[in-house]
Structure formats: C-alpha cells, structure tokens
Image (tube, rainbow, N blue to C red):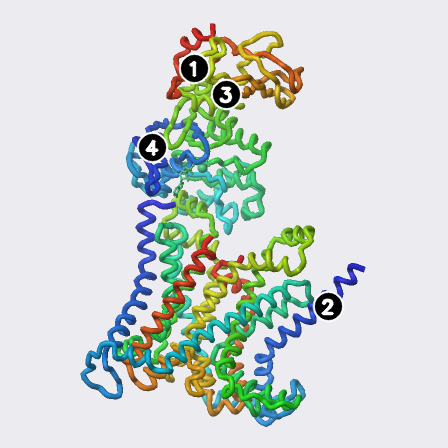
Amino acid sequence: MGSINLKQVTKNFGDVSVIKPIDLEIKDGEFIVFVGPSGCGKSTLLRMIAGLEDTTSGNIEIDGEDATATPPAKRGLAMVFQSYALYPHMTVRNNIAFPLKRAKVSKEEIESKIANVAKILNLSDYLERKPGQLSGGQRQRVAIGRAIVRQPSAFLFDEPLSNLDASLRVNMRLEISELHKTLATTMIYVTHDQVEAMTMADRIAVFNAGIIEQVGSPLELYNTPANKFVAGFIGSPKMNFMDVDPITDDPTCCLGIRPEHIEISTEAGMWAGKVGVIEHLGSETFLHVHVEGSGTFTVKAGGDCPFVYGDKIFLSAMDNKMLHFDAAGITLPQQHASVVSI
Amino acid sequence: MATTNSRTLARLMLFPSVVLLLAWMLVPLCMTLYFSFLDYNLLTPGNNEFIGFLNYEFFLTDPAFITSFFNTLLLVGGVLLITLGGGIGLAILLDQAIWGRNYVRIMVLAPFFVMPTVSALVWKNMLMNPVNGLFAHFADWIGVTPIDFFAQIPLLSIIIIVSWQWLPFAALILLTSIQSLDREQLEAADLDGAGPFSKFYYIVLPHLGRAITAVILIETIFLLSIFAEILVTTSGGPGYESTNITYLIYTQSLLQFDVGGGSAGGIVAVIIANIVAIFLMRLIGKNLED
Amino acid sequence: MSINKSNKSKLIYTFLAWTISSLIFFPILWTLITSFKTEAEAISSSPSLFMFDWTLENYEEVLARSPYFNHFWNSIVISLGSSILGLLIAIPAAWSMAFVQTKRTKNLLMWMLSTKMLPPVGVLIPIYLLFRNFGLLDTKLGLVIVMTLINLPIMVWMLYTYFREIPSEVLEASRMDGASIGEEILYVLLPIALPGIASTLLLNVILAWNEAFWTLILTAADAAPLTAFIASYSSPEGLFYAKLSAASAMAIVPILILGWFSQKQLVRGLSFGAVK
Ligand SMILES: Nc1ncnc2c1ncn2[C@@H]1O[C@H](COP(=O)(O)OP(=O)(O)OP(=O)(O)O)[C@@H](O)[C@H]1O
Ligand SMILES: [Mg+2]
C-alpha cells in the first residue's frame, strides 16, 4: 500500500526556506508528477519523502502512519536517481540483490526474484556485468530493477530519464508507464520534460519557489490553469502573454493565449504583426510574430505554412481560448473572458 | 544527505578522532606550558619553584635561539626552494616523450622511501666525508681540495641532504599535475604564437598552483621539525651553526635535563609554528579547497 | 623529416632524464653496492662500481652484531599497527566529514591538519614524562599510539578527499535499499573507496616506518625499530662503510620495494587530492 500524505511540510536550509508549507495527498497507486522550474524544491521534497532530508516542520504520513522521523531504510520506499546511483563494484545481479539481502530474504527467493525482474526488464543477459560495462539505458533498467525487486509501497523517481538520448527516453517512458500499469504501485516522478509530465501522470503538481501552484490532471492544468504561472509553465511552446487588450486597446492586466489557439489571417484580426523567425518541424510550424505594442507572439500553424520572413499577417484568438488573469496572476473566470473578446 | 539521524551518527563517528587529537594536543601542551614556568631540572630534584617568565627570558636571550631560529627558516626555505625549482624542472622533463619513463620514475621516487637516519648516515659518511667520501675522491681526482662539508658548510650540507629526500615528492606531484594539463590549451597557445616561456608562465605555472600549494604545505609540516638528519650528521654543530629550534630544545631538555627551559623553548616553537601555520592555512584555504 | 626531428629531441630528453634520475638514485645504488664490498674496497680512493670481489660478510656481521630481526619486527608492528589502528579511527571520521557536511567541517579539517604542525618538541617533555609514568617508554604499544596520533590527521584528510569523490547518491541509494549506516559503510563505501584506503594505508606505513623523532627518543632497545638500529651506526661504526651500507640496505629495501609497487596510488595520496 502506498498512500503518502504531506501535511504543512516545510524545509529550511539554514535561513533559506526552500519548501514553504505544502499540503499534498497522494493516493495509493497514483502516478503523480512534480514539475517546476529549476531550483524550486522538487528534488528536496522528494528526498524529504524518501527520508534522505529532514523535515523542518509538518508531517509526512505513509499509509496513514506518521513517518516524519522514520529513517529512509524503514520507510519501505524505493528511489531511482538521476545518476542511477548503481553500486559500481557489484555485478548487476548483486546490485539487484542488495535490497533483498538487507531485508534478509532467503537465497532461493532472491534468485527467483532476480530472475523475474531480469525478465521483465530485459536484463537477463547482463546479470554478471558491472554497471561500468552497461549502456545508459541498461543502467537505468538496473536502477529500476533494484527498485522494484523489493516491492516497495511507492517509487520515487528524480529525473530518471534526463541522461538518456531522445529515442531511448521515449522507450523508457513507455516502459515506466507500462510498469505502473502492471505493478499499480504509487509513483512520484520529478521531471523537467513537458511530454513526460503530460503523458505519464495521473496528476501533475506544479511547483514554484517552494510552493505547489496547482495540482490536477494533465488536461485540467492545460485547460484551466489556476494562475498565470501554471498557464505559462504547462504547454509547449509557452503561452503568449500580453498586457494590452487587443479589442479595446486598454492596458489591462495580463491576457494569455496558447500558440495553438491563434488563427492566422492575411486580411484582418485582433493583432497585426510581422513574421519573424519561422521554425518548420515538418508536421507543424512555429511562427514568431512581432506585434506592435504587445511583443513577440509564438503561433502554431500547420506543416505547410506559406509565410516567409517579413510577411505582414493578422492574428486572432480562437473563441473562449483566451485566459485573463488579475493583478495577482490568478485566473479570472471564463465568462469574464468571453465578454471581453466580443 | 543530512538528517538528524545521520548528523547524530556523524558526530559520534567524529568523536574518537577529535577527542584523541584534542587530548594529544592539549594535555601535553598544557603540561609544557606549566613546566615552562617552573625551575624544573631532572638532575636537581627540588621543589620545582614557580619562576615566572625566567625560562623564557633565558631561552629567548640565548644567542643560540636567534641562530637556531634563522637556521630553521633557512632550512625550510632552502629546501622548499630547491625542491620546488628542481621539482618543476624534473616534472617538465619527465613529461616529455622519453624512453623508459617508468624506470626513470622509479629511480626518481626512491629517495622518498629512505628513512631519514639512513640518508643522513649515507650522505655523511660515504659521500660527504672529507677523507674517504666519494665527493672527496672526486675532488682529488679533478685536483681540487675536498670540502669538509660538515665543518665548512654544515647547514647547507643538511639542506642538500634534506632536499634530496624531498625532491622526489615535489617532482612526482608536480608531474602528475602537469600530466593533467589540458593539451588543447597548449595547442591553442601554439596557434596564438606563444613561445615556450610564455607558455610556461601563463599556462603551465597557473595550472600547477594547486600542486605547488600542496607541496609547500606538506613539506613545511615535516621540515619545521627536522631532527634525525641533524642528530646523525652534525649534532647541531659546529657551535650552533646547524642547530634548528627542534634540535636546540632537544639538547636543552633531554641532554641537559632542563625540563623548564626545554618547555619554554617548546612553547616558543609552538608559537612560531602557529605563525607559519596561519600563513599556510590562508594559502590552502584559498588554493586547496575547490 | 619531422619524425627524424622529434626522434632526435626524444633522444636528448631521454638522455637528460636518465642522467638526472641516475644521479638522484646514485646514493642508494652506491649504498647497495658498497654493502657487498670489503671494508678496504669500500674506502678505496679509486672506487669501483662493479669490478670487485662481491661478499656477503657485511650482512653476516651486522646480523651477528645486532638483533636486526628484532628491530625489523618492531618496525613492522609499529608501522602496520599504527596504520591499521589509524584507519579504524579515521574512516568513520572521514565518512562524517565527506557525507554529512556542516559549516564546521572545513574548519575541523583545517584544525586537524594544524595539529600536524604542532612541533613535536612542544609536547616532547610531557609525552616523555607521561610515557615514563605509564611504563610506555621503550614499548611497541607506546609507539603505536604515538604514530597513530601523529598520522591521524593525514589519514583523515586523505580518506576525506577520496570519499568526496564518491557520489553521495550511491550511499543514499543503499540507505533507500534498507542498509544501516554500518552496512552502508561496510558494503558500499569501503569497497568503492578501496584503492584510496589502500594508498592511505601504504603512505602511512611508509611515514611510520621512516619516522625518526619519536622512535629515537621514546625507545632504547626492546621496542627500537629500524630507525634507531641505524642511528646506532652514526659513530664511530659509521666509518665502517661496508657494514653501514649493509645495515642501511636492510633497513630501506623492504620499504623501497613496497613503495615502488604502489607508486601510482601513492602520488595521489601524497598530494591530499590536490592532483588527480
Ligand atoms: N544542501 C543544501 N543546502 C542549501 N541549499 C540547498 C541544499 N540543497 C538544495 N538547496 C537549495 O534548495 C533549492 C531547491 O533545490 P532542489 O534541488 O530541490 O531544486 P529542484 O527543483 O530539484 O531543481 P532542479 O530542477 O534543477 O533539479 C535550491 O535553491 C537549492 O539551491
Ligand atoms: Mg532536482
């Protein structure tokens, strides 16, 4: 079982407060992803859950029991590190056996469990090698094998795929998702990668400077971000922000429109602009359009976009897709937005 | 990686080292300090009266102190100069493509493993002896008067012996450091038209900074308390010409059984070492810490 | 053409390097050779490098005259004993400093190293008197204690620099895998740091083997290691070059061999991690 409950958890390093009070309930079997800009405290919180860092105040409950002061070895969690952190002096077999040996599992059982894990992760041929003789992807698998073999109540991943090349990342991403489906064990997953977050998560927690800005399913965050930060952080390329209302020309507080929610026209629209850099990706095209008074917009267009550098074009927001934020950056209700876009 | 748990444990595991070193340093040091104010001689067992700073007065105004103070500085400075200069030269030479570099390395490193008493004895008798030493034979052979090393240039002779012991250490550390130098930097400098001297001065020398610091630090620690080499060769003589502070205190306390005087000397030595240490710690604090 | 030129410079450098290193090595070589000469040949004014009657009589005489094996055994016990004892104390300390860093860690390290700068003469008299009172004078135990203490800072520092290179995540992983701190050190840290620990041990064996202040002052006969054995040749027996050489050879050859075998690890250890 693996429900994890954070209650008013904080962390200070000396005088610096890295985690402001955080409340978060992670349900058993859930796949939750932590995202946020570099240095916002994702790893720190993960390590606090693991027990590798002290909690300054607040409580961490695992399966309903207070585990705030429990040492990492006793929490029954498994962690996969960005650097894999394999034991370089042990063979793959011994790496995977290590947690079992610590748990005093019998020899025969260790053997059968290793065989099983090796089969699941395609490691059977490498069991006698040392980590130094493996590729990055294989090392990653060993790290995962070492984590799953002792059937922890939850897995903690800290950017596990960031050292792999792009195609391997896609494979491993699928493998981890697959693993989650078969094991149905709680997973907490820290990443920088939008695609990983959107595709793998049941829920995403968006971090910013030591607080959680919003928690929700990927589509919730995409469609109804709670504030300007989440709106800007989720979605790629980033949402365009402007502070002049395109209809009334009044200076307002913050409007936002995603690149994929902008229509291009050669005749008329809310904004007039000049095409700058064009990025052709084949299936789609990103245009960087300079709009007088509102800065540069990123616009997503089809793969066969006809425009060239310097073209004058018009942009309009699709219906009901524009987001409005108040002075504090909080998203305003949608009906308000539609009033403006009339 | 720091939880209350591991911090408590860490403290526990540091405890033995810290307590032992503290005891090793403080207990004897306090005793030395205490003795240094007493009229305490093992030959004249008395009531060990408290005599204030009299021991210090005697020690510091003794002309032997001034001599041995400067001898200590000369010894440390001279050896550092020779080993660093020679070490850099050797390191650059050994860094070149040469045949049999491993054998050369083994030969260069060897003196470091020779115990001080042995190297002092070998140099004193078999090399520097004015009658039967090899140097004397050599001088005879080319027709000049042999030098009587320990009578004419006692301190320099000791500097030579000690330098021979420490040159390997400096050379090997510097060689390792040079070998870690990024070759592309040198090639880039070649492209910029830098000559060998400017390459050495602007690229090699700064790169060696850390290694040089390490050499200075470690050698100084050992050189400040050179003892066996003096004991075996000159016994500090002639007069006090080759006496350093360590040796002076040894003669005062253990040979003359003057515990009070020797202790005062010991405290003075500690103060001098501390002054040197402060300089050195500044140096490493900057250079050895990354 | 260019191959020719670089070959030429290689030749010059090789010649230079061999000449200089031979000069540096010469005193040792000369000692070894002299130890096989007769006393008459040893002081001959036209000394010969190889062309003489090789003899073992000096070794026989040295062995007959003094209890060489006694001293040799003392040296081994003192240097090995103090190095192992030192490791046992230094490893936990180095673990703490490398993996549970606090603001005071750097200062603590510096302080430890600064105890190394305390001149032995500053504590000579109390140590001598304490040893006398506790009956430790001229005992191996006494010297093991002293050697452990004077080399402890170097050991801690060396181990610290080795440990620092081990990614702490590997140790954390073992903690997540359910290892206690003891198991973490025993099964993960020590095997990974083995080369560093070995060179720490080696360097300290060599330093203790060659230490010649405390060993000369605190021993008389029973516990005297090879340093004291050799010092007894300072005069007037020192004038018997061949015997002096034989004794010297017997004192330095064991450690010389050990040093040569381990030179690679030593260099790194020697510099306290200042060079890699
Ligand atoms: N041991 C420490 N002592 C002091 N400050 C620390 C320590 N560890 C982390 N920090 C600080 O805490 C903040 C959060 O760090 P953390 O590693 O959790 O960020 P992160 O969100 O994981 O970033 P990234 O995405 O780059 O991995 C950073 O500002 C960092 O500088
Ligand atoms: Mg991180």
Q: CA distance from mark 4 to mark 1?
A: 31 Å
Who's the residue at 50% across and 81% down the image?
B120
Looking at the rendered image, the disc whose residue lies closer to the viewer, 3 or 4, is 3
Is the N terminus of chain A in the top left, top right, bottom left or bottom right quadrant? Answer: top left
Please give the label number shown on residue A222. Answer: none
- Using the numbered discs, state the Cα–Cα distance from disc 2 to disc 1 in whole angstroms: 80 Å
**Which residue is situated farthest in the top direction here?**
A342
Which chain is mark 2 on?
A: C
Q: CA distance from mark 2 to mark 4?
A: 69 Å
**Disc 3 to disc 4: CB gap under 8 Å:** no
Mark 2–mark 1 CB contact (< 8 Å): no
Q: Secondary structure at mark 1?
A: strand
In the rendered image, the vertical position of residue A102 relative to residue B200, given as above or below: above
Both on one chain, marks 3 and 2?
A: no
- Residue tagged 1: A252
Helix, strand or loop at label 4? It is strand
Determine the chain carrying the residue at label 3.
Answer: A
Choose between A289 and A162: the one closer to the eye.
A289
- The quarter holding residue B31 reads bottom left
Could you tell me the amino acid type at mark 4? Answer: Lys
Q: CA distance from mark 3 to mark 4?
A: 27 Å
Q: Residue at x 25, y 76 (%)?
A: B53
Quadrant position of ligand 2: top left
Secondary structure type for disc 3 = loop
Three-letter amino acid code of the residue under disc 3: Met
Evaluate whether label 3 is on the same chain as label 4: yes
In which quadrant of the rendered view does residue A56 lie?
Answer: top left
What residue is disc 4 on?
A: A20
